[in-house]
Image (cartoon, rainbow, N blue to C red):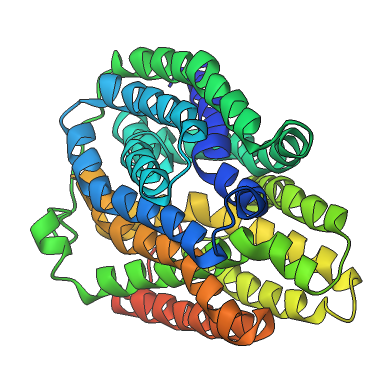
Amino acid sequence: MSSRSIWLLAFAETLLWSSLYYLFPALLLSWEEQFGWHRAELTMAFTLSLLVSAFCAPLAGRLIDRAASPWLLPGSALGGGLLLMLLPLVNSMPWFYALWILIGLCSSGCLYEACFAFVVRHAGVDARKSITHITLVAGFAGTLCFPAARALAGRFGPDVALWVFAALVILLAVPMMYVGVQSLSRLPAPELHPDPEQRSRVSDVLKRPGFWFLSLAFSLFVTNHAAVLNHLMPILKEWSLPPELGVLAVAMIGPMQVLGRLLWMSFQRSLSVSRVALICFVGINLATLFLLGSRGNPQLLAGFVVIQGSSYGLISIVRPLLAKQLLGGENFGAISGMMAVPFMICMAFAPTLASLLWERQGYVSALWVIWVLSMGGLFCLILSLTLFRGPSRSD
């Protein structure tokens, strides 16, 4: 694998995640003031965006399996940047929803799911190293987005923030994605030799209970992270903590994701992928308890940021690797796309779910519900690994 191409993909993913995902929670409070819409109404736009991305993920995976990556990834990135440029021109909720739905369509073809499926297809045994390098850089997407977007929105308004991030996508992310994908696409995709006892044909995979429990486990995990991340600044505001502390906490989750990935690189030879997954699930449940405790003890907020960030940072690597280990590499684009559907559906509904729970009983009750759901995810992961009869320590 070309290291130059991987770094180009890494920096492109950083800008794309900053602009097509993290920008929404970063501007949520600004849009509340600008439009006067309810929080649940605003977050529903993001929910619809992520739902569209989820349902389009299998199609994107199949296109990647059919070698469509050279135009799919950069084309989707370009479409997302152009749609961001249009957002400041709308002032009605239907058009706001429509643009975010189209952004979701573009996201399905250029964010992690599509990028990792492409890397797995062309990297073969080097997939772990390449994915780790990409996520090490892209882990700073939130760190880039939240302070910059809040500063731009506070000084010039959210419209200027949108235009700046749209320009970053169009002028930087798209060319980097195009060059990186074109370079790697010239390399022959490695020949896959599927295990006859673990065939990865989609029809076979869908019949396996372990696949569904694995998908549900990661889906409940991301429900926790998406709900907490999108509402962290409103949560801390409701608890009367300084707003600067909220921005700092959200911004530091990205570096903690990178910290988790660096720890993974140090201990990956001694820990199996399945064990790391279990550690991450335990960690994110512990992080929620730390966040709940930070109401009376702000020092616990630091513990929450470290554990939440590092757990989620590792999961973004572990999820594709564990799926490949358990299900094989044949038709991996389509399989990862199928796994992405419930994952993205839960990611989509999590912000709106948290908004609805907040409107009814406040954020404390909402966080307890989210904690119960992520504990269910830990149970599903254990059950899935049991059904696969203990995966081996290597990929």
The residue under the point 39% across, 22% down is 78
The vertical placement of 291 against 121, above or below, is below
Residue 391 image-quadrant placement = bottom left
Question: Is 45 situated left or right of 68 in this image?
Answer: right
- Answer yes or no: is residue 348 visible: yes
The front one of 335 and 152 is: 152
The front one of 244 and 33 is: 33
The residue under the point 73% across, 31% down is 156
Q: Residue 313 at what x, y percent from top left? A: 60, 52
The residue under the point 30% across, 18% down is 185
The vertical placement of 30 against 370, above or below, is above
Q: Residue 122 at what x, y percent from top left? A: 32, 28
Q: Residue 231 at what x, y percent from top left? A: 63, 64
Residue 138 image-quadrant placement = top right
The vertical placement of 352 against 45, above or below, is below
Which image quarter holds the N terminus? top left
Question: Is 147 situated left or right of 125 in this image?
Answer: right
The front one of 240 and 281 is: 240
- Answer yes or no: is residue 332 visible: no
The front one of 393 and 258 is: 258
The vertical placement of 306 against 381, above or below, is above
Count of numbered circles in the view? 0
Q: Residue 13 at what x, y percent from top left? A: 51, 32
Q: Residue furthest left?
A: 203
